[in-house]
Image: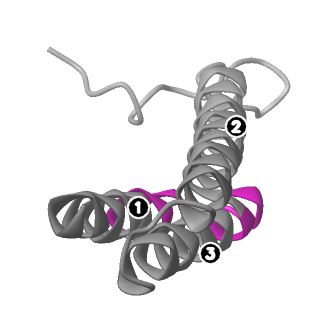
Amino acid sequence: MRSRFAGAPDADGEDPHDDDVHEDARRARWTAVATGFLLALSGLAAAVARLGGGLPARVPAAYALGSAVCAAAGVLGARGRTRRALWLMILGVMVMALGDQFD
C-alpha cells in the first residue's frame, strides 16, 4: 500500500497528491484561525459579563487572559503553525476554566 505522500509524478512532473496536501493545510489554517478567534470572542464576552458582578478581580482577569491566549493561537494558525495553535487554544480554555472555578 502506498503512502499518500509517496505518489508518483504524472506526465508534467507534478505530484497529483500535492493539491490534496495543500487543501488540507489550508483547511487546517482556517479552522485554527476561526476556532482561535471564536474562543477569544467568547472569553472576552465572559470577562465583560463577569466584570460588573461582585466577584473577585481574578475571575474576569482569567477570562481575559485565556481570551488573549486564544487570540494568539488564532494568529499562529493563520501563519501555518496549527499544532502550536491547537496547544495554545487548549491552554487558553484551561485558563478560562480556572477562572470559572474562582467564580
In the image, residue 14 lies at what x, y percent? 75, 32
The picture quadrant where one finds residue 26 is top right
Predominant SS along the magenta part: helix
Q: Earlier in the sequence, mark 1 or mark 2?
A: 2
Residue 80 lies in the magenta stretch: yes
- Give SS at disc 2: helix
> Residue farthest to the right?
12
Which residue corresponds to the image point at 57% horizontal and 73% vertical from the top-left?
A: 64
Question: Closer to the camera, 91 or 57?
Answer: 57
Q: Which residues are magenta?
A: 75-87
Amino acid type, label 1: Arg
- Mark 1 sits on what residue? 83
In the image, residue 65 lies at what x, y percent? 52, 80
Residue 12 lies in the magenta stretch: no
Q: Relative to 13, is 12 above or below?
A: above
- Mark 2 sits on what residue? 34
Tag 1 and tag 2, C-beta contact below 8 Å: no
| Label 1 Cα neighbours within 10 Å, binned few <14 / some 14-19 / many ≥20 | some
- Give SS at disc 1: helix
Amino acid type, label 2: Ala
- Mark 3 sits on what residue? 68
Find the distance from the CA under tag 1 to the CA under tag 2: 15 Å
